[in-house]
Image: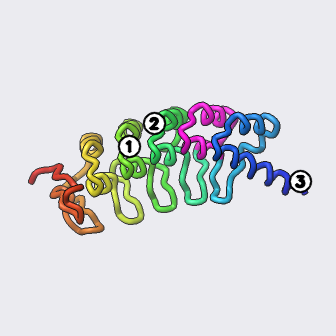
Amino acid sequence: MGNNNSSARGTEVVALATEGKWEDVTARLDNDPSLLAAQDTQGNHLLGIAAYAGNKEMATLLLDRGAPIEVKNGIGTSPLWLASGYGRTNVVDLLIERGADVNTVNNTNDTALLAATSRGHVDVVKRLLDSGANVNTTNKTGDTPLIVAANLGHTDIITHLLTSGVININEKKCLRYQRPLCRGRQRQPRRCPNVIES
């Protein structure tokens, strides 16, 4: 019976967080600190929800109360990945300052850098690179940040990637199309720029 009540309270506090009712979440945590570990059916924790929402104040409170910074949801996605993928620069800064692993991967080997790159969040990409994100990371489909940026036409991000780390562009190929990235000619040539002239 006790476990059922605890589970119900956990479900309730996560639902409140999802709805953005952070004052109510704080009140529940004040009454029951164990709710810090609450998660929904997809494995989303309070810190991940705060990161997704870009709520730096709440993310700070959760971290100060002991929320694990590397907690992952059901698909292995960390709070830093969520903040990065949704362009929540303020929370990205907080998590990096608190020691989040910028190279942690989810279940498809996607990192925060790949998430930010795929959605065109230039400022987040810069912060991740400045904090040691692996510019040559590869996910399960063989995509690197440079490949993703080129395929989506994110020229500003391409520039940052090329100047931030050691990338041998002559050997980088878009595995999906088997064409040299430096030519910038993929399936959608209008969106994939000629970044490097031959």
Q: Say what amino acid the circle numbered 3 marks.
A: Gly
Secondary structure of the residue carrying numbered label 3: helix
- Asked whether the beta carbons under mark 2 and mark 3 sit within 8 Å of each other, the answer is no
Q: Residue at x 20, y 57 (%)?
A: 190
The answer to whether residue 61 shows anywhere in this view is yes
Q: Quadrant of the C terminus?
A: bottom left
Q: Say what amino acid the circle numbered 1 marks.
A: His
Q: Position of residue 185 (x, y in %)?
A: 18, 61
Q: How many marks?
A: 3
The answer to whether residue 166 shows anywhere in this view is no
- Asked whether the beta carbons under mark 3 and mark 1 sit within 8 Å of each other, the answer is no
Q: Position of residue 99 (x, y in %)?
A: 53, 37
Q: Residues within 10 Å of mark 1 (few under 14, many from 20)?
A: many
What residue is shown with label 3? 2
Q: Which mark is residue 121?
A: 1
Residue 191 sits in quarter: bottom left
Q: Residues within 10 Å of mark 3 (few under 14, many from 20)?
A: few
Q: Earlier in the sequence, mark 2 or mark 3?
A: 3
The span from disc 1 to disc 2 (Cα, nearest Å) is 9 Å
Q: Earlier in the sequence, mark 1 or mark 2?
A: 2
Q: Say what amino acid the circle numbered 2 marks.
A: Thr
Decide which of 100, 184 is in the foreground and name it: 184
Please say which color scheme the image uses: rainbow
- Asked whether the beta carbons under mark 1 and mark 2 sit within 8 Å of each other, the answer is yes
Give the magenta part as a residue range: 46-69
Secondary structure of the residue carrying numbered label 2: helix
Q: Earlier in the sequence, mark 3 or mark 1?
A: 3
What residue is shown with label 2? 89
Q: Is residue 160 magenta?
A: no
The span from disc 3 to disc 1 (Cα, nearest Å) is 44 Å
Q: Position of residue 35 (x, y in %)?
A: 75, 44
Magenta stretch: helix, strand or loop mostly: helix
